[in-house]
Image (spheres, rainbow, N blue to C red):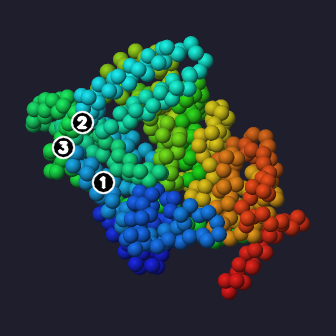
Amino acid sequence: MAFTVTSDNERQIEVWNNVKDRDWPSSPQQIRRKLTETAVRCLDKRVRFIGLEAYEQAGGTRTRDLFEEDSGGWVDDIGLLDRLVTEKLKAEAAAIAAEGWKWVDADTSFEYGHTFSLSRVTPVGQLLTEKERAERESLRSEYEDLESEYAEADEYPDEIDARIGEIEAALDAYGKRPEIYKPTDQARAGAFVSIGEDGKLVVKRGFVRPEDEASVVGKADARDEADSQEAGDGHHAGTSEGSDRGTAVVTVVGEAAQPEEDESETIKPLPDRLISELTAYRTLALQDAIARNPHVALTALLHKLVTDAFRSGMTPGRCLEASVRAVHPVAQPDDLAEFPPALEIIARHNAWAEDIPQDDDSTLWTWLTGLDDASRLALLAHCVSFGINALHEKPNPYSGYGLSQHALDCRKAEADRLALATGLDMVEAGWKPTAANYLGRVTKARIVEAVRESVGEDMALRLVHEKKEKMIQEAERLLAGRGWLPEPLRIAGIEETTDAAPGVEHDARPAEEVAVADLPAFLADDVPEDVPASDQIVAQEAEDLVAAE
């Protein structure tokens, strides 16, 4: 069904060839995005990954803007880009597989939370020679001596500050060296290979699937002994066995589709899909905020328990029926895994996972009772945070599957209450409006309204005359750093600080005017003061339609 989104049979075949060999099926969303992709910016991580030079040497062309800065322009041949990315990912995955892993999964990106159900093996050291180890220890000692010597000083002298910076950079480089794993661990574990937002390769090693949890038997003792010896010599354990154990699984998932030219003189409601993706950001930010606020987490848990105890019948079964079911967004924007709160959650989860015993329940109970109160509250907050659900979904007016509009309103109200209690600020959390996550997904009227709220009426009127692609590009620049948020990310109940759309309560920042001298040439012309923005849009769209006819 997903492939019917386009009638371009050649493009259907290209996408099919890129997804058909996956170990698990691609989602309809991923296939539709890939099929509706018409152009890719040269700033896209896939283009950075292979390099523009490699793309053009393979016969690829790109579109440039002759009059404005376009950051390299747009890649035209999406099929060629897919093929080059797939080939390079396969080569990188094969190199990782040669280290001796049981499996290697490679993709342009992986969904947020894809490793939460997997355990992870622990490395036994880093790939360092004895000389490099000695140098690292020497740098650490020098760093500690300098910190101790200037502990009472208000600030470091320039030469000392520069030296400390050099030491920190050198130690950081040592910390990024490949880690050594036991061959027995590698025989049951694997690695994920993907592309970071900067276009660089991202490799995460040592994950164990549930079916591979049992330890590998056979030559375990001999391998462990050999591993210890090789670790001491600074060699990578398990490399010689990689050829018969590593298997690279490479797939390529499409990025977000380009926006359609769906314009109107009125501001229509946001699409359900876009609201779902925006509230995915908010849900993760709220989960992170709850985890960092044990007092609020305890209140939220107590609120749930009191509601269950005093407002519903008792449920028989387990000794304690209170539970938290992890919430993972179904509709995920492409950069959700790189969203700062998501990175915080993963780092916090991994840190706790290293400390929590993996034995039976009795061992876990003993470990928990031995924690100090602060640690117990911090762990409680982390666990409670996974149950936070601020996601939007299309309401079901009928009984059965899904939520009613009333239930969604209650969920939104509770999310706002938690956001206020934790002091959540989506701007500080790292969200900003871009072409991919908002501006390229809404109508011109919505873009103009966002600029009007954030920058002012004059700037909004200047944008009205532009084509949508230019409007999106300039709006992204104008909104950068101004703290503007779309309605689904605002907190209801906070007094308005700007003249937003009627009936909308939110925490948007006041509009800040932009000097005409700071504008690009195409926006610097004067605009009529007596023409409303909506009329300007209608007139411009009529002009565009006549030109198209």
Question: Residue 397 location in percent, x, y?
Answer: 61, 57
Q: Earlier in the sequence, mark 1 or mark 3?
A: 1
The amino acid sitting under disc 1 is Glu
Question: Residue 383 location in percent, x, y?
Answer: 47, 32
Q: Which residue is mark 1?
A: 92
As displayed, is residue 11 above or below residue 51? below
Q: Residue at x 55, y 29 (%)?
A: 292
Side (left or right) of 495 relative to 428: right
Q: Residue at x 88, y 64 (%)?
A: 529
Q: Earlier in the sequence, mark 1 or mark 2?
A: 1
As displayed, is residue 11 above or below residue 312? below
Q: Which residue is mark 3?
A: 239
Where's the N terminus, which quadrant? bottom left
Q: Residue at x 79, y 75 (%)?
A: 539
Q: CA distance from mark 2 to mark 3?
A: 10 Å
Q: Which residue is mark 2?
A: 181
